[in-house]
Amino acid sequence: MRNRRRRAPDPYDGILLVDKPSEWTSNDVVSKVRNYFKLSKVGHAGTLDPMATGLLVLLIGKGTKLSDQLMNGDKVYEGTLHLGVNTNSQDADGEVLETNDAAHITREMVEEVIRTKFMGPIEQIPPMVSAIKKDGVALYKMARKGIEIEREPRKIEIFEFDILEFENPLVKFRVKSTKGTYVRTLAYDIGTELGVGGSLDALRRTGSGPLSIEKAYTLDEILECDKESLEQKMILLSDMIK
C-alpha cells in the first residue's frame, strides 16, 4: 500500500478578506487561492452568488475552525432593485418571465413598503435557485430541470434598509440583516408588494459580522503575492486570540 503524499502544513492560520469579482463562484476563489499558494486548508465563511461582488471571507489553515462563528454574523449588502421585471431566479442572471410598467412608482411608495413590510423580524420563502436541499437534492438542481416545489418560510430579521438612490425603475439600497437572508428575494417581494414585480440587478456584500469590505483585497492584489508576503494581507489567528 503506497503512502499518500501530504501537503506541508499551512504556514499561516487565519482569515483573508477578498473582494470577490463578479462571475466567479465562491468556490472558484477558494480553489484559486488554495492551488496558487499550494495551501492545505482553505474554506470560506458564507457563499456569494456568481453575480455578486464584495466581501468573501476566506479561512486558511486552522482558521477554518472559525467557520460557524463567522457565518453566524449579521451581513450588510448594497444592491440594485429593478422594478417591473420578474425573472425565474429573482435576479439579472435569470430568464425574464414578466415585465410591467413601473413608471408610477415613487421613492416614497418604495420607502413605505419597506417600512411597513420589510423591517424587523419577517418570514422569507427561499428561492428555488438556492443551495438549500430537499431530500438531499439542492433546489437549484431541481430548478434547472424546471421543477418547482413548495418551500417552508424562514425567519430572518432586517435591521436597516435604506434607499441610497432612486431613479425609476432602478432603486439602489443598503440592507443589514441576519444571516440566511436572500437579498434577491427581498427585491422580488418588494416588487410584488408594489404590484409591478421586481428583481435584483446588482449585489455587493460590504460587511459580515465585524469584518468590512474596506479591509479586503482584490483577487489580483492577492495573486501578486508570494507565499511569504501573503501573511501581510491576512488577519492571523495568533493576533485574534491575544
Image (spheres, rainbow, N blue to C red):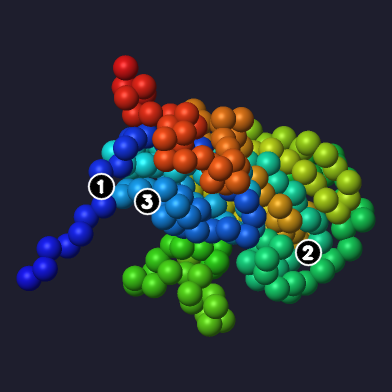
Task: Mark 2 and mark 1 in contact? Answer it, CB < 8 Å.
Answer: no
Callout 3 environment at 10 Å: few (<14), some (14 to 19), or many (20+)?
Answer: some
Cα distance in 3D space between marks 1 and 3: 9 Å
Give the mark, 3 or 2, whose residue is nearer the N terminus. Answer: 3
Task: Mark 3 and mark 2 in contact? Answer it, CB < 8 Å.
Answer: no
Q: Which residue is mark 3?
A: 38
Q: Residue shown at 83%/51% (left/top)?
A: 170
Amino acid type indicated by mark 3: Lys
Callout 2 environment at 10 Å: few (<14), some (14 to 19), or many (20+)?
Answer: many
The total of numbered circles placed on residues is 3
Question: Camera-side residue: 240 or 142?
Answer: 240
Q: Residue shown at 32%/17% (left/top)?
A: 242
Q: Position of residue 65 (x, y in %)?
A: 29, 40
Amino acid type indicated by mark 2: Val
Q: Which residue is mark 1?
A: 8
Q: Which disc number belongs to residue 99?
A: none
Q: Position of residue 107 (x, y in %)?
A: 85, 42
Question: Camera-side residue: 180 or 15?
Answer: 15
Which marked residue is nearer to the observer: mark 2 or mark 1?
1
Callout 1 environment at 10 Å: few (<14), some (14 to 19), or many (20+)?
Answer: few
Cα distance in 3D space between marks 3 and 2: 44 Å
Would you say 67 lies left or right of 214 here?
Answer: left
Circle 3 — which element? loop
Q: Which residue is mark 2?
A: 85
